[in-house]
Amino acid sequence: MYIVPSSTAYNVSRRLANILSCSVSGVIRKRFPDNEMYLRIEEDLKDEDVILIGNTRSDSDIIEYLLLLNAIREEGPKSLTAVIPYFGYARQHMRYNNGEPISSKVFAQAVSQYADMIISVELHDNQTINYASVPFINLKIIDPIYEYFKSKKIDYVISPDDGGYDRAKIIASKLKVPAYYIDKKRIDATTVKMEPPDLDYSDKNILLLDDMISTGGTIIKATQMMRDRRAAKIYACAIHGVFAMESNIKIEKYVNELTVTDTIETKYSNITVSDTIARAL
Ligand code: R5P
């Protein structure tokens, strides 16, 4: 068995290889003179079980991932599993207006042409699964989040929107504290209207738990509302730290602690998804 890492997933690839006791293949990466991407996998993958790990956050990540899928398939592996810890473009999983593409469908269909199975982590919307023509597992990250927060004194777990309430309830029940959600309405890409639950926040430590942090608008607004209500510590946690426009720098000024998983590798990736992925393989 070999793991082939895209350039977005070196750490999670190494962690997974340790758990599975397999090798991480080298990949030669260069640019052609016109800046097109050149890739070459260094191992012979014929008749091997191969796992390609990489996320698809940027357009360049997507090109790299598709080129590696093809490179592996051309080698004639025994099996090819596409692990995509952060499945980018999943927010455009439907047509909101005429003339728009269904972006997550494009990528799910493209990966299906090469992979025998797709594994991703906390997709933004389950609809993306239906666009794949091969088995598609969407992993939930529960125990690693619980393990990380169990030693901290948390009074409430709060989801910044009702869509994340189930996740908040599961973690809260493991931490043996109540879960709530903020009534959130998105006005546009950067503006949200939020109504916090009516609670006693005074001197309470709050775990704000979301699926992703992008611009940081949601987490910052939620934190401000809790601070106005005299909350003590705010722990902000998300599965995917997208941190668009370096929003992490701003978020750090508001929260007591910022933690994300390593689906996207950042300096806040204190929680690894590698054990959860290993169990699914
Ligand atoms: C929304 O549906 C998601 O759960 C996140 O709350 C959202 O994507 C966070 O985005 P931002 O950091 O830009 O507010």
Image (cartoon, grey):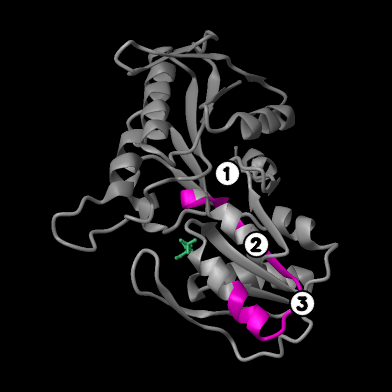
Secondary-structure class at tag 3: loop
* Horizontal side of residue 74 vs 86, given as left or right: left
Find residue 275 and report its horizontal and vertical position in percent: 69, 42
Name the one closer to the observer, 15 or 11: 11
Find residue 69 and report its horizontal and vertical position in percent: 41, 25
Labelled disc at residue 263: 1
Question: Which residue lies at the image location 37% right of the left edge and 48% below the top edge?
Answer: 89
Amino acid found under the numbered disc labelled 2 = Lys
Name the one closer to the observer, 47 or 39: 39
Residue at the farthest right position: 151
Q: Magenta residues, as a range?
A: 223-245
Query: Between marks 2 and 1, how big is the CA–CA gap?
Result: 23 Å
- Tag 3 and tag 1, C-beta contact below 8 Å: no
Indicate whether 143 appears above or below 173: above
Instruction: Mark 3: give few (<14), some (14-19) or many (20+) Cα within 10 Å.
Output: some
Query: Is the residue indicated by label 3 positioned so its CB lies within 8 Å of ligand 1?
Result: no
Decide which of tag 2 and tag 3 comes sooner along the chain: 3
Query: Between marks 2 and 3, how big is the CA–CA gap?
Result: 15 Å
Task: Give the mark toward the camera: 2 or 3.
Answer: 2
* Residue denoted by label 2: 253
Q: Is residue 232 magenta?
A: yes
Amino acid found under the numbered disc labelled 1 = Thr
- Tag 2 and tag 3, C-beta contact below 8 Å: no
* Residue denoted by label 3: 232
Decide which of tag 3 and tag 1 comes sooner along the chain: 3
